[in-house]
Image (cartoon, grey):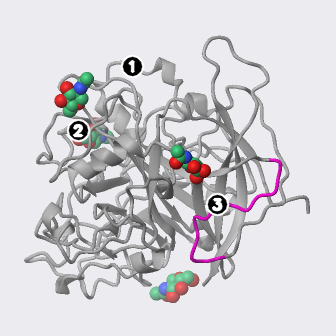
Amino acid sequence: MKSQAAFIALTLVSSVTAFWRMPCRSQTGKARIDPIIDPGEISGHVHTIHGGGGFGFDATYETLTAQDSCTSCEVTQDHSAYWTPTLHFLYTNGTAVMVEQVGGMLAYYLYYLTNVTAFPKGFQMVAGNPNLRDFTGPFPDVQLSDWPTVPTDQFFLQQRALGFNCLNYAKDPEPSLYRHVFPTQEYMDANCLDGLRLELAFPSCGNGDVTSPDGKSHVAYPSLVKEGNCPEGYDTHYPFMFFETIWNTYAFAGDDGQFVLSMGDPTGCGYHGDFMMGWESKEFLQQALDTCTNESGEISDCDLFTIQSDAVGAECTFDMPDVLADDNVEGPRTGLPVGVPIQYGPDNATAYAVAGRSGVATSSVSESSAPSTWSDRPTVSYTAANPSVTSTALGGIIVDVATGHRTSVTSSSTLSTSSSSITAAPSSDSAADSPDIVTTSYITQGNEVIEMAIVEVEVTVTATPTAAAKHRRHLQKHLHHAGRR
Ligand SMILES: *[C@@H]1O[C@H](CO)[C@@H](O)[C@H](O)[C@H]1NC(C)=O
Ligand SMILES: *[C@@H]1O[C@H](CO)[C@@H](O)[C@H](O)[C@H]1NC(C)=O
Ligand SMILES: *[C@@H]1O[C@H](CO)[C@@H](O)[C@H](O)[C@H]1NC(C)=O
Ligand SMILES: *[C@@H]1O[C@H](CO)[C@@H](O)[C@H](O)[C@H]1NC(C)=O
């Protein structure tokens, strides 16, 4: 056994001024609630919800930031609500179970545009389209330099704002936003031994309004999804928000069935997410954007933030409405919760009756069978790709292979096993000087939850490129036994 340090990837961090990652390790709940799309009524599908405990059918800035409200995120000044659909495994016999979500959610606040302004009170937005079932673009994406510089085709950008990252910590990591549809189950069984990371990039250009009827039209993607030019009329620059959730898909390896997002999407193309601003104030968030500029991205490196433990965050849950009490979202249950039909595409999904809404029986399950072409979907080989071409977000990892060069280092460092300090810096005695954790991931191995910390190590660039010498860093993985279940 050589060492615990697995592989190194190179990254470019020069394009982003600063950022932080908001860890929200626990859900406030999993329920058919979506106060942006379906205010006041039962949502069409289940979401996994993080952040402010003042969440519910009628959540607003006021309910999220009310005096006695809580948050499941680590920064107590952030009561924002962050939600995405849940992932389920549907056995061929019709039984559905929710896939285990590992490590909660990371919500990245990154600054790529200039003059970034804080989300105002009442701001909310949706990214993605739950009805999409088809991705028609090439795989991998064409080079960013060939993308249109004028972002008039928001549909093009929206489809590329989704990522399904096949996790295999023993191999080089895939870049963020690399693949925009689910890998096939055969592919996941063979390659994604540590699960699947669902990634979602939000639009960061705005027209100045805090919301819009569809939750979307007041915001737009810049020309390269995370950066580039904003469309005309969208001159307000917000932080670039990026969600990551990890799902233990490998627990179903070899099982007969398929993965389906809660809105009946077996393709992944309909993945989406919502954000409702719940920071203490716009001014506070602006101050954080202006001053929390440490490249580590660690919330602990921002003096403004008051940090609470994950144990305290885990106590924060919203009040489950009585009408959802019998949903049994986790399963095992017959079909998706509740009665959501599977729609395979490639046509857009169509509306279905939402169980529990007035006049709709809770047992109206209409299953559709898999098309015979299901197994003919194109598979992609596992490759650590060329992110300088394909990656459009500084998510967990960006690999820069523009250098065409990979290095691996050895390190015998082990992280301390204090379960209360899961984001603690590694006690590294390797040659690496002052490594900073860039991101952490959680995986389940047997009975143990393992935190994988990606640390940043300064390295000397020997071959200096012409003009502006780029600031390159190494990423290095460490394993951390974060706790037992
Ligand atoms: C369907 O198969 C799964 C996995 O084998 C099993 O756990 C579940 O009980 C089965 N459901 C029914 C209704 O037989
Ligand atoms: C920065 O953004 C704010 C708010 O959108 C705007 O009022 C201001 O004019 C912008 N400043 C510059 C220099 O673009
Ligand atoms: C930035 O973060 C690093 C690593 O966490 C820390 O050592 C350093 O003191 C921070 N710098 C500032 C200016 O806060
Ligand atoms: C699905 O809906 C989107 C947005 O309304 C539209 O742009 C797209 O063309 C539709 N796709 C299909 C296959 O109909």
Q: What residue is shown with label 2?
A: 219
The magenta span reads 418-431
Q: Nearer the viewer, residue 199 or 260?
A: 199
Q: Which residue is the extreme one toward the front?
A: 303
Q: What residue is shown with label 3?
A: 425
In the rendered image, the quadrant that contains the N terminus is bottom right
Q: Position of residue 52 (x, y in %)?
A: 28, 68
**Relative to residue 248, is residue 54 drawn left or right?**
left
Does dot 3 land on a helix, a strand or a loop? loop
Q: What residue is shown with label 1?
A: 148
Q: Quadrant of residue 251?
A: bottom right
Is there CB contact under 8 Å for labels 3 and 1?
A: no
Up/down of 23 relative to 136, above or below: below
Is residue 4 visible in this depiction of the protein? yes
Q: For the residue marked with disc 3, what is the amino acid?
A: Ala
Q: Position of residue 457 (x, y in %)?
A: 70, 44
- Badge 2 local density, few (<14 within 10 Å), some, or many (20+)? many
Q: Quadrant of residue 35?
A: bottom left
The kind of secondary structure the magenta stretch mainly shows is loop
Q: Position of residue 117 (x, y in %)?
A: 27, 38
